[in-house]
Amino acid sequence: MLSLSKLDFVHVELMTSDVYVEDEVSVTEYSAAYDVLAELAYPPERSRETIAGLMESLKR
């Protein structure tokens, strides 16, 4: 897992723009959210299998 130490900012890409978040409280919240998502994410092989299965089910 990627270990994120103290970050100075967070870059967020939106549909038509992007934003840099720099206040310490928000950066801490984004970092915590990233850590949770990283823990919950499937490993690469399982992600590929899941996506392939979903694509196959859409063909029917």
Image (cartoon, helix red, strand yellow):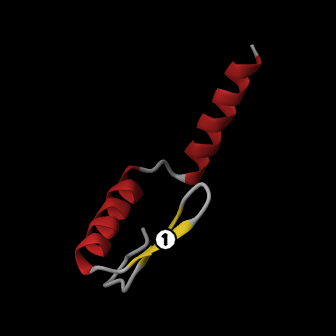
Horizontal side of residue 8 vs 25, given as left or right: right
What residue is rendered at 49% in x and 71% in y? 19
In the shown orientation, is residue 54 left or right of residue 34? right
Residue occupied by mark 1: 19
Residue 28 position by quadrant? bottom left
Identify the image quadrant of residue 2.
bottom left
Q: Element type at marker 1? A: strand
Closer-to-camera residue (10/4): 10
User: Which residue is drawn at the image coordinates 31% and 74% (left, top)?
Assistant: 27
Find residue 48 and report its horizontal and vertical position in percent: 64, 44
Residue at 55 percent across and 59 percent down: it is 14
**Going 22% across and 74% down the picture, which residue do you hit?**
25
Q: Quadrant of the C terminus?
A: top right
Quadrant for residue 22, please give it.
bottom left
Classify 3 as above or below 8: above
Q: Position of residue 10 (x, y in %)?
A: 42, 75
Mark 1 crowdedness (10 Å alpha carbons): few <14, some 14-19, many ≥20: few
32, 56: nearer the viewer: 32
Image quadrant occupied by the N terminus: bottom left
In the orientation shown, which residue stands out farthest toward the left? 25
Relative depth, front residue between 53 and 10: 10
Residue 26 higher or lower than 51, as above or below: below
Q: Outermost residue, right direction?
A: 59
Q: Is residue 26 left or right of residue 16?
A: left
Camera-side residue of 18 and 49: 18
In the depicted structure, whether residue 5 falls above or below residue 54: below
Place of residue 12 in the rendered image (x, y in percent of width and height, measured from the top left) = 49, 66
Q: Residue furthest front?
A: 16
Q: Amino acid at mark 1?
A: Val
Q: How many marks?
A: 1
